[in-house]
Image (tube, rainbow, N blue to C red):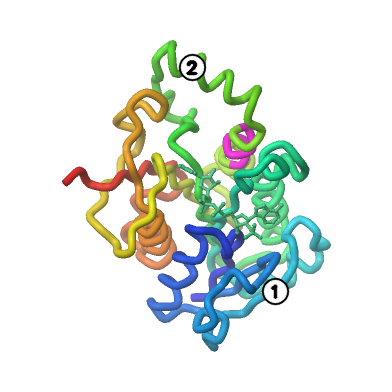
């Protein structure tokens, strides 16, 4: 397969690039700086790098770069500094998701392109009417006011859920929801649920970035897992040891 990854220079994105290359696929990335990738990764003949800020690219260039892609994965996230949290672009993830999906539609495809979005357990899948406590509702309401990236994550998943929907002929999607992200060096046992089984605010679990990358790669490359989760927002937790 040929897979485009945005957010590929991030902590999870880099792991997803490596995982897909390890599985023998062709990977294309758009990164602001390739220096954030290791030398062996940059030198991998199956990796194509476009150095640019994704939202600065004209529509035609995004369309051209996605033309041969069977799947797109987004590991974009706002940098955790003042400019990243409160500066522009406030709708980084949503606008990148929307513009890439529009480019795929403009290209016209013979079978739906997979779009796998890295999202968060702080977001609800409103298709499933997931219940949350009054306390969590209040905290999420405050986060929406104080943390623009939270709204961005919600709107990116909402775009896929409501604008692309379940029956689109050009795009099929899944939004992966990890809990608190941690770094581990190897894939460990993890569990996938249709909805959170614990409160993301008051009882958060842990999810290794490398497990997120592994599951996103499974969604892209494993048809059985894709059929199980497409059009949904699977939640991923590390298995408690
Ligand atoms: N932290 C948690 O516990 C947690 C839990 C659940 C979900 N999440 C979500 O998981 C996602 C990714 O997490 P992560 O830790 O892997 O992220 P990360 O390491 O911060 O990576 C973010 C990626 O987005 C890119 N990016 C940031 N601002 C950009 C801009 N203005 N234009 C273009 N690219 C930009 C970064 O590029 P550069 O390298 O060029 O900066 C990087 O590739 C985020 O959406 C986050 O909200 C986080």
Q: Residue 137 — which label?
A: 2
Q: How far apart are marks 1 and 2 (CA)?
A: 40 Å
Horizontal and vertical percent for residue 30? 66, 67
Relative to residue 44, is residue 227 drawn left or right? left
Horizontal and vertical percent for residue 41? 51, 79
Q: What is the quadrant of residue 141 in the picture?
A: top right
Circle 2 packing at 10 Å, graded few (<14), some (14-19), many (20+), is few
Residue placed most toward the observer, 50 or 165: 50
- Give the secondary structure at mark 1: strand
The span shown in magenta is 151-156
Horizontal and vertical percent for residue 218? 37, 62
Circle 1 packing at 10 Å, graded few (<14), some (14-19), many (20+), is some
Horizontal and vertical percent for residue 121? 43, 36
The structure residue drawn at horizontal position 41% and vertical position 60%, both measured from the top left corner, is 213
Residue assigned mark 1: 50
Q: Up-down: is 136 above or below 155?
A: above
| Main secondary structure type of the part rendered in magenta | helix
Q: Tell me which numbered mark, 1 or 2, is placed earlier along the sequence.
A: 1
Q: Is mark 1 within 8 Å of ligand 1?
A: no
Q: Is mark 2 within 8 Å of ligand 1?
A: no
């Amino acid at each position: 397969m040929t897979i485009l990854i945005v957010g590929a220079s991030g902590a999870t994105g880099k792991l997803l690039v490596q995982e897909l290359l390890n599985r023998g696929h062709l990977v294309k990335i758009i990164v602001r700086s390739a220096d954030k990738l290791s030398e062996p990764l940059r030198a991998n003949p199956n990796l194509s790098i476009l150095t640019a800020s994704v939202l600065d690219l004209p529509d035609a260039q995004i369309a051209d770069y996605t033309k041969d892609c069977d799947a797109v994965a987004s590991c974009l996230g706002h940098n955790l500094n003042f400019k990243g949290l409160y500066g522009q672009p406030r709708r980084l993830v949503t606008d990148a998701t929307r513009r890439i999906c529009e480019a795929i539609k403009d290209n016209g495809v013979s079978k739906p392109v997979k779009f796998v979005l890295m999202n968060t357990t702080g977001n609800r899948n409103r298709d499933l009417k997931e219940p949350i406590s009054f306390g969590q509702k209040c905290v999420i309401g405050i986060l929406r006011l104080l943390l623009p990236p939270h709204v961005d994550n919600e709107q990116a998943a909402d775009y896929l859920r409501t604008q692309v929907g379940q029956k689109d002929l050009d795009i099929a999607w899944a939004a992966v929801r990890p809990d608190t992200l941690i770094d581990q060096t190897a894939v460990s046992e993890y569990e996938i649920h249709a909805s959170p089984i614990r409160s993301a605010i008051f009882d958060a679990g842990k999810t290794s970035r490398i497990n997120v990358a592994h599951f996103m790669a499974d969604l892209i490359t494993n048809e059985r897992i894709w059929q199980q989760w497409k059009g949904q927002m699977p939640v991923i937790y590390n298995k408690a040891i």
